[in-house]
Image (tube, grey):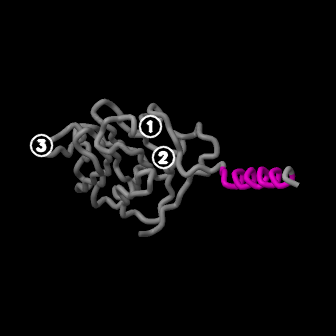
Amino acid sequence: MKTIFFAFIIITLSLINFSCQSDSKKYLELSESQLRDIGFVINERGIFFKSEVPENTKEGIFHCMVGYINTNDDQGTRMILAPARQNLGKIVKENADYFDSLPVLKSDYYFAKIIEVSGENIYTSFWKKIVTIPILVKQTKYNFKIKKDVIVYMKASEGLKKKLSYVENLEKYFVTLSEK
């Protein structure tokens, strides 16, 4: 009787463990070189990403640039709005820093949300109902201001899908961000 009871417990625990496992991850984990390939700058100074938001340029009213920065001294997100006739790449502050000197990525993708792996929100854009690909950016191994890994929700555009074409079943990572 004891043998049957222990066998039952082992089978039950195995089934529970199996049912809790899922082949769909919450985010896509990329290497440092793969992150660089999609536009991240990762070096001894920090982790950076700057991208133009193409949806706003269609209207012809203004350009929008979103950026993420994590260095020894500074961390956070930045957004720059400029008149459509002005080149975002040439916008430089009076006290220009390294982040400002980095080129603005001109692509059809950008980040729409950034959260810590724990779930704490760092940034949510004002764009609504957007399909994204959550990508893990490992920061714990660096000595930067944010020492936690973050998940960056990148717009699932055709350009990003093409850059990530080596990822099998990329669609399983798609997440639609809903309205605020």
Which secondary structure lies at badge 2? strand
The amino acid type, in three-letter code, at marker 2 is: Ile
Q: Between disc 2 and disc 1, whose residue precedes?
A: 1
Residue drawn where x is 59% and y is 40% of the image: 167
Residue holding disc 1: 35
**Residue at the location (86% across, 53% down)?**
4
- Describe residue 177's horizontal placement relative to residue 3 as left or right: left
Point out which mark residue 86 bears.
none
Q: Amino acid at mark 1?
A: Leu
Considering the image in quadrants, where does the N terminus appear? Answer: bottom right
**Sequence order check: which comes first, mark 3 or mark 2?**
3
Q: Secondary structure at mark 3?
A: loop
Amino acid at the residue labelled 3: Asn
The one nearer the camera, 35 or 3, is 3
Q: CA distance from mark 3 to mark 1?
A: 28 Å
Residue under circle 3?
A: 95
Q: Residues within 10 Å of mark 1 (few under 14, many from 20)?
A: some
Q: Residue at x 77, y 55 (%)?
A: 12
Q: To which residue does mark 2 refer?
A: 135
Q: In the displayed structure, would residue 133 be above or below residue 177?
A: above
Magenta stretch holds residue 105: no
Give the mark nearer the N terminus: 3 vs 1: 1
CB atoms of marks 2 and 1 within 8 Å: yes
Q: Which region of the structure is painted magenta?
A: 4-22
Q: Main secondary structure of the magenta part?
A: helix
Q: Quadrant of residue 33?
A: top left
